[in-house]
Image: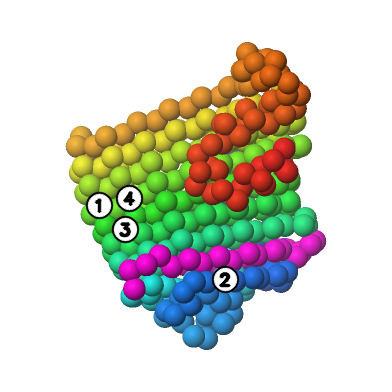
Amino acid sequence: MNYNLPSTQDELWRRTRPDRFDPNQSMTSSVVGDLRIDTSPSKGVHVLPLADARAHFPLLLKQSSVQEIPNFARLIEERGNEGVFVFVEPGAGNGEEVRIRFDLSLTQGSHGALRNFVVVSPDTRVRLVETVEDPGGEQAFASTRVLVGRGAKLEYLRSWNLNRKAYWHSGIHLNEGATAQVTTFARGSGISKIEEVAELAGDGADLDELFVDEAKGRFHIDAGMTVRHLAPNTRSRLKVRGVVRDKGYSLHHGNIKVIREAPGSDTYFSSRHLLLSRKGRADVIPKLEIDIDDVKAGHGATVGSVDPEAIFYLMSRGLTKEDSEGLYVEGFLTELFQRFPEMEGESRREG
């Protein structure tokens, strides 16, 4: 099947040249170096490589509830031959939280495409931790589908360390009464294009998302987050935070869509950048499309530098300038560490 891939005329690709990515170059080669899986409890919980899932769960893999998927992501799904499959059966955990973690490392110097698939059955509670470590290479592509059943609760924590040209897409679909808290920490080097589409498709669906990126060196990260309210009484909170060091560049797109069939929707997009270098750059592009009056919607964005008075105060208490700035950044990222405590140490090492 032929897909019209992005061009510089596409609104979401104006600042990241699509020709830097070559989806036709060895997309079907192996890109997974190592995969570690941990689940608790294990009964009714399936976490396995994509190749095994094709043999055991072929019908689930054909589900495609998320409708507005970019053509780039559809191409990855068509060609991706590796990835992780997660399926939490109805009744898994017997009302208790199911805990899943998978750690995935990429192969150095390779090209390839990942296709991940997550299915959370109705009325289950799941905490899913996903980590991706990248030793560096040419390019990598990934597309993840997340389907959250009626009344289910998902806490989804993601840590991406991407050190090559990378295109990462996520499609999240929430059914009636489903809730999802999604937390992402993205950093690395090279160029990363992140696109996500979240569809609140059932009455009362609720999305609370925090996306944090850290751009240092010459790292270029372009994060486009889209939330579509498709049913009544849905709620979304989309918070994007960026820390920019050296000559890094961080771009945030926030796209909120509320259709006529979604009265009572409540949505807000906020973006905040912390610039730690005069040579760094940060941009924010918010967009709201509201087709109905009965809705609460808004957005806010700030780009700021370190408060010199705060640094002076910390240094007057005996801290070095470097340690003072480190504490200031930790304060800026407090919510990330509250949700994802393991990332506090990662941020210190990255800084």
* Residue drawn at x 52%, y 86% as measured from the top left: 55
Residue drawn where x is 57% and y is 60% of the image: 130
How many other residues sit within 10 Å of disc 4, few (<14), some (14-19) or many (≥20)?
Answer: many
CA gap between label 3 and label 4 equals: 6 Å
* 3D distance between C-alphas at marks 1 and 3: 7 Å
Q: Mark 4 points at which residue?
A: 206
Question: Do we see residue 10 in this rendering?
Answer: no
Give the magenta part as a residue range: 94-119
Q: Nearer the viewer, residue 144 or 122?
A: 122
The residue tagged 2 is: 38
The N terminus lies in which quarter of the figure?
bottom right
Q: Is mark 4 on a helix, strand or loop?
A: strand
| Comes first in the chain, label 4 or label 2 | 2
Is there CB contact under 8 Å for labels 4 and 2?
A: no
User: Residue 237 appears in which quarter of the rendering?
Assistant: top left
Looking at the rendered structure, the kind of residue marked 1 is: Gly
Q: Which amino acid is tagged 2?
A: Asp
The answer to whether the residues at label 2 and label 3 have Cβ atoms under 8 Å apart is: no
Residue that carries the numbered disc 1 in the rendered image: 204
Which numbered mark, 2 or 3, is in the foreground of this view? Answer: 2
Q: Is residue 107 magenta?
A: yes
